[in-house]
Image (cartoon, rainbow, N blue to C red):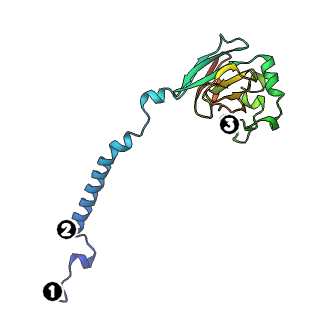
Amino acid sequence: MSEHETTSEASGEPTRRDFLYLTTGMAGAVGAAAFAWPFIDQMRPDASTLALASIEVDVSSLGPGMSLTAKWRGKPVFIRNRTPEEVKAADEVPLSDLKDPIARNENLPAEAQATGVDRSAGKDKQNWIVMIGSCTHLGCVPLGQAGEYNGWFCPCHGSVYDTAGRIRKGPAPTNLPIPTYSFVSDTVIKIG
Protein backbone atom coordinates (compact mmCIF):
# COMPACT_ATOMS: atom_id res chain seq x y z
CA MET A 1 0.00 0.00 0.00
CA SER A 2 1.26 3.42 -0.82
CA GLU A 3 1.19 6.37 1.49
CA HIS A 4 -1.77 7.91 -0.20
CA GLU A 5 -4.03 4.82 -0.26
CA THR A 6 -6.46 4.49 2.59
CA THR A 7 -8.64 1.62 3.59
CA SER A 8 -12.21 1.89 4.73
CA GLU A 9 -11.03 0.77 8.19
CA ALA A 10 -8.80 3.80 8.47
CA SER A 11 -11.51 6.16 7.24
CA GLY A 12 -14.05 4.90 9.81
CA GLU A 13 -16.59 3.51 7.32
CA PRO A 14 -18.05 0.04 7.95
CA THR A 15 -16.48 -2.84 6.13
CA ARG A 16 -17.88 -6.13 5.00
CA ARG A 17 -16.21 -7.74 8.02
CA ASP A 18 -18.06 -5.33 10.35
CA PHE A 19 -21.33 -6.27 8.68
CA LEU A 20 -20.63 -10.00 9.14
CA TYR A 21 -19.76 -9.52 12.83
CA LEU A 22 -22.95 -7.58 13.40
CA THR A 23 -25.25 -10.05 11.62
CA THR A 24 -23.59 -13.06 13.29
CA GLY A 25 -24.01 -11.47 16.72
CA MET A 26 -27.65 -10.65 16.06
CA ALA A 27 -28.37 -14.17 14.79
CA GLY A 28 -26.71 -15.61 17.90
CA ALA A 29 -28.80 -13.37 20.20
CA VAL A 30 -32.04 -14.33 18.44
CA GLY A 31 -31.07 -18.01 18.60
CA ALA A 32 -30.27 -17.81 22.32
CA ALA A 33 -33.58 -16.07 23.03
CA ALA A 34 -35.48 -18.67 20.98
CA PHE A 35 -33.69 -21.47 22.84
CA ALA A 36 -34.32 -19.93 26.30
CA TRP A 37 -37.98 -18.95 25.78
CA PRO A 38 -39.54 -22.40 26.50
CA PHE A 39 -37.65 -22.55 29.80
CA ILE A 40 -38.73 -19.05 30.78
CA ASP A 41 -42.32 -19.60 29.64
CA GLN A 42 -42.76 -22.76 31.72
CA MET A 43 -42.14 -20.74 34.91
CA ARG A 44 -45.35 -18.74 34.48
CA PRO A 45 -48.31 -19.89 36.57
CA ASP A 46 -50.79 -22.24 34.99
CA ALA A 47 -54.23 -20.82 34.07
CA SER A 48 -55.89 -22.96 36.74
CA THR A 49 -53.52 -21.50 39.34
CA LEU A 50 -54.33 -17.96 38.28
CA ALA A 51 -58.03 -18.76 38.54
CA LEU A 52 -57.52 -19.72 42.19
CA ALA A 53 -55.69 -16.49 43.01
CA SER A 54 -58.83 -15.28 44.75
CA ILE A 55 -62.10 -16.88 45.75
CA GLU A 56 -65.39 -15.59 47.08
CA VAL A 57 -67.10 -17.48 49.90
CA ASP A 58 -70.75 -17.03 50.88
CA VAL A 59 -70.96 -17.01 54.67
CA SER A 60 -74.67 -16.18 54.96
CA SER A 61 -75.43 -19.61 56.46
CA LEU A 62 -72.87 -19.25 59.28
CA GLY A 63 -74.50 -18.26 62.53
CA PRO A 64 -72.51 -17.48 65.69
CA GLY A 65 -70.43 -20.48 66.71
CA MET A 66 -70.39 -21.99 63.21
CA SER A 67 -67.47 -22.39 60.82
CA LEU A 68 -66.62 -23.70 57.40
CA THR A 69 -63.49 -24.70 55.56
CA ALA A 70 -62.84 -23.40 52.06
CA LYS A 71 -60.00 -24.35 49.72
CA TRP A 72 -57.79 -21.53 48.46
CA ARG A 73 -54.52 -22.04 46.54
CA GLY A 74 -54.58 -25.69 47.54
CA LYS A 75 -54.77 -24.92 51.27
CA PRO A 76 -57.65 -25.16 53.73
CA VAL A 77 -58.96 -21.82 54.99
CA PHE A 78 -60.94 -21.72 58.23
CA ILE A 79 -63.76 -19.17 58.35
CA ARG A 80 -65.50 -18.87 61.71
CA ASN A 81 -68.30 -16.70 63.04
CA ARG A 82 -67.18 -16.64 66.65
CA THR A 83 -69.59 -16.34 69.57
CA PRO A 84 -69.38 -13.31 71.88
CA GLU A 85 -67.83 -15.62 74.49
CA GLU A 86 -65.08 -16.70 72.08
CA VAL A 87 -64.32 -13.08 71.16
CA LYS A 88 -64.19 -12.14 74.86
CA ALA A 89 -61.92 -15.10 75.68
CA ALA A 90 -59.49 -14.03 72.94
CA ASP A 91 -59.52 -10.38 74.05
CA GLU A 92 -58.81 -11.21 77.69
CA VAL A 93 -55.52 -13.01 76.98
CA PRO A 94 -52.52 -10.80 77.85
CA LEU A 95 -50.02 -10.57 74.96
CA SER A 96 -47.28 -11.61 77.40
CA ASP A 97 -48.97 -15.04 77.71
CA LEU A 98 -48.70 -15.69 73.97
CA LYS A 99 -45.99 -17.83 72.43
CA ASP A 100 -46.16 -15.69 69.25
CA PRO A 101 -47.33 -12.10 69.91
CA ILE A 102 -47.32 -11.12 66.20
CA ALA A 103 -50.68 -10.84 64.38
CA ARG A 104 -49.57 -12.79 61.22
CA ASN A 105 -52.29 -10.90 59.36
CA GLU A 106 -51.49 -10.02 55.72
CA ASN A 107 -54.01 -7.16 55.96
CA LEU A 108 -51.89 -5.41 58.64
CA PRO A 109 -48.27 -4.23 59.01
CA ALA A 110 -45.80 -7.02 59.83
CA GLU A 111 -45.24 -5.74 63.38
CA ALA A 112 -48.96 -5.71 64.34
CA GLN A 113 -49.69 -7.40 67.67
CA ALA A 114 -51.76 -10.58 67.97
CA THR A 115 -54.70 -8.94 69.72
CA GLY A 116 -58.16 -10.37 69.15
CA VAL A 117 -59.09 -7.36 66.99
CA ASP A 118 -55.93 -7.54 64.83
CA ARG A 119 -56.54 -11.23 64.16
CA SER A 120 -60.24 -10.72 63.35
CA ALA A 121 -62.02 -8.95 60.48
CA GLY A 122 -61.76 -5.63 62.34
CA LYS A 123 -63.40 -3.69 65.13
CA ASP A 124 -66.93 -3.83 63.72
CA LYS A 125 -66.62 -7.51 62.68
CA GLN A 126 -64.61 -9.00 65.55
CA ASN A 127 -66.73 -12.13 65.46
CA TRP A 128 -65.31 -13.13 62.04
CA ILE A 129 -61.94 -14.83 61.77
CA VAL A 130 -60.36 -16.14 58.55
CA MET A 131 -57.15 -18.21 58.79
CA ILE A 132 -55.09 -20.58 56.70
CA GLY A 133 -55.85 -23.94 58.28
CA SER A 134 -52.39 -25.51 58.24
CA CYS A 135 -50.56 -26.11 61.51
CA THR A 136 -47.42 -24.00 61.52
CA HIS A 137 -45.41 -26.92 62.89
CA LEU A 138 -45.57 -29.44 60.04
CA GLY A 139 -48.57 -28.39 57.96
CA CYS A 140 -51.21 -30.75 59.37
CA VAL A 141 -54.85 -29.59 59.44
CA PRO A 142 -55.96 -28.83 63.02
CA LEU A 143 -59.38 -29.81 64.34
CA GLY A 144 -61.76 -26.95 65.07
CA GLN A 145 -63.37 -26.14 68.42
CA ALA A 146 -61.06 -28.54 70.16
CA GLY A 147 -58.21 -28.41 72.61
CA GLU A 148 -57.67 -26.72 75.90
CA TYR A 149 -58.62 -23.23 74.63
CA ASN A 150 -61.64 -24.35 72.55
CA GLY A 151 -59.93 -23.09 69.39
CA TRP A 152 -58.02 -25.47 67.14
CA PHE A 153 -56.02 -28.55 68.08
CA CYS A 154 -53.53 -30.40 65.91
CA PRO A 155 -53.65 -34.05 67.05
CA CYS A 156 -50.51 -35.00 65.12
CA HIS A 157 -48.04 -33.30 67.49
CA GLY A 158 -50.23 -31.55 70.04
CA SER A 159 -50.22 -27.90 68.96
CA VAL A 160 -53.06 -25.98 70.65
CA TYR A 161 -54.48 -22.73 69.22
CA ASP A 162 -56.99 -20.44 70.95
CA THR A 163 -60.23 -18.93 69.58
CA ALA A 164 -58.19 -16.32 67.67
CA GLY A 165 -55.92 -18.94 66.06
CA ARG A 166 -52.93 -17.99 68.22
CA ILE A 167 -50.51 -20.74 69.25
CA ARG A 168 -50.73 -21.35 72.99
CA LYS A 169 -49.05 -24.75 73.53
CA GLY A 170 -47.17 -27.35 71.56
CA PRO A 171 -44.38 -27.39 68.99
CA ALA A 172 -45.92 -24.95 66.45
CA PRO A 173 -43.74 -21.81 66.36
CA THR A 174 -46.26 -19.25 65.06
CA ASN A 175 -49.96 -18.36 64.96
CA LEU A 176 -52.16 -19.60 62.13
CA PRO A 177 -51.59 -17.08 59.31
CA ILE A 178 -54.38 -14.80 58.12
CA PRO A 179 -54.58 -14.33 54.34
CA THR A 180 -55.53 -11.12 52.59
CA TYR A 181 -59.31 -10.96 52.58
CA SER A 182 -62.18 -8.50 52.60
CA PHE A 183 -65.95 -8.49 52.88
CA VAL A 184 -67.40 -7.90 49.42
CA SER A 185 -70.84 -7.66 51.04
CA ASP A 186 -72.26 -8.51 54.45
CA THR A 187 -72.40 -12.19 53.49
CA VAL A 188 -69.53 -12.70 51.00
CA ILE A 189 -65.83 -12.79 51.82
CA LYS A 190 -63.20 -12.45 49.07
CA ILE A 191 -59.95 -14.24 49.89
CA GLY A 192 -56.83 -13.33 47.95
Residue drawn 72% across the image and 30% down it: 119
Residue where numbered disc 2 is placed: 16
Location of residue 69 (image quadrant): top right
The mark lying in front, picked from 2 and 3, is 3
Residue where numbered disc 1 is placed: 1
How many C-alpha atoms fall within 10 Å of the one at disc 3: few (<14), some, or many (≥20)?
many
- The amino acid sitting under disc 2 is Arg
Residue 40 lies, in percent from the top left, at 38, 44
Seen from the viewer's position, the closer of residues 28 and 98 is 98
Residue drawn 58% across the image and 28% down it: 140
Element assignment for label 3 = loop
Residue 9 lies, in percent from the top left, at 24, 76
Element assignment for label 2 = helix
Residue where numbered disc 3 is placed: 174
Q: Decide which of tag 2 and tag 1 comes sooner along the chain.
A: 1
Q: Decide which of tag 2 and tag 3 comes sooner along the chain.
A: 2
Q: Quadrant of the N terminus?
A: bottom left
How many C-alpha atoms fall within 10 Å of the one at disc 1: few (<14), some, or many (≥20)?
few
Against 114, is 76 above or below? Answer: above
Residue drawn 66% across the image and 18% down it: 185
Against 159, is 17 above or below? Answer: below
Element assignment for label 1 = loop
Q: Decide which of tag 1 and tag 3 comes sooner along the chain.
A: 1
